[in-house]
Structures are given as C-alpha cells and as structure tokens.
Amino acid sequence: MNGNNSNNSNNNVLGALDAVLAERKTQADPKSSYVAQLHHKGLNKILEKVGEEATETIIAAKDASQSGELKELIGETADLWFHSMVMLSHLGSNSDAVLAELAKRFDLSGLEEKAARTSND
C-alpha cells in the first residue's frame, strides 16, 4: 500500500491487523508466531520492543531530514505502530480506541487539546 490510499482502506488495514493480533494472542503457538511469542514473554518484553522501535524511528527521522529519503522512516514507523498495537492488544485494547481518541481531538487546536488533558490529570 502507498500513502495515496483512502483513509477507509487504511483503517481496514488497522482493523484487520487488530483481528490478527487478537487471534494470535490467544490461539497461536509462541514457537511459530512472533506475536504469540511477544505475548508469551509478557508486557515488559513488548514495552522493550516499543521503546526499541521508537528509538529506531527517531534515528530514521533524523537521517531522513538530511537525505530527504523517507523509505526507512516509513518502515520504522510501521514497526513502531505494529509493536504499539501488540501492546494495546496485550492490554485488552486495539486501534479503534486510539482512532476514537484522535477523532475526539480532531476539532480542537493542539493547545486546547493539551490544556484539556492537563486539566483532567
């Protein structure tokens, strides 16, 4: 898929990935499924992977700012999203919850949204 696909198509990818992650969380063998293996190893291992992918994404962004080449950045961002979705799945959530939160924020300016979050903490 490229960046020119419709939002609906991209949301379908997230929904399909949510379904695969949920299935592999409960039904796949950790010996044959990377996702099942992560769930089997537990939250700390999943968080370690999220942190690793976040760091790799930051490095790729710095490289892209110099080279103008985005391919590695897109790949690392996909890895970060994937592992974040594994984390959500492990904790009983999915991309729908994140998309709903983003939708709630859509009509707010970034400063208004941040102020609302700060006042609710």
Image (tube, rainbow, N blue to C red):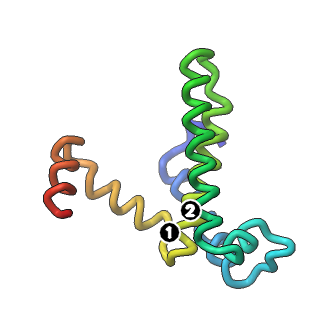
* Residue 29 % position (x, y): 81, 79
Q: Are marks 2 and 1 in contact (CB under 8 Å)?
A: yes
* Residue 97 % position (x, y): 41, 67
- Inspect the image, locate mark 1, and give the three-letter code of the amino acid beneath it: Asn
The extreme bottom residue here reads 27
Q: Quadrant of the N terminus?
A: top right
- Inspect the image, locate mark 2, and give the three-letter code of the amino acid beneath it: Met
Q: Residue at x 67, y 30 (%)?
A: 71
The circle drawn on residue 94 is 1
Q: Quadrant of the C terminus?
A: bottom left
What is the secondary structure assignment of the residue under circle 1? loop
* Residue 53 % position (x, y): 62, 47
- Residue 13 in the image: above or below residue 109: below
In this orientation, does residue 16 appear?
no
Query: For mark 2, what is the residue?
Result: 85
Q: How crowded is mark 1: few (under 14 residues within 10 Å), some or many (20 or more)?
A: many
Q: How crowded is mark 2: few (under 14 residues within 10 Å), some or many (20 or more)?
A: many
Residue 54, image quadrant: top right
Q: Residue at x 57, y 74 (%)?
A: 90
Along the polypeptide, which appears first: circle 2 or circle 1? 2
The circle drawn on residue 5 is none
Q: Residue at x 58, y 39 (%)?
A: 57
Q: Residue at x 64, y 74 (%)?
A: 42
What is the secondary structure assignment of the residue under circle 2? helix
The extreme right residue here reads 31
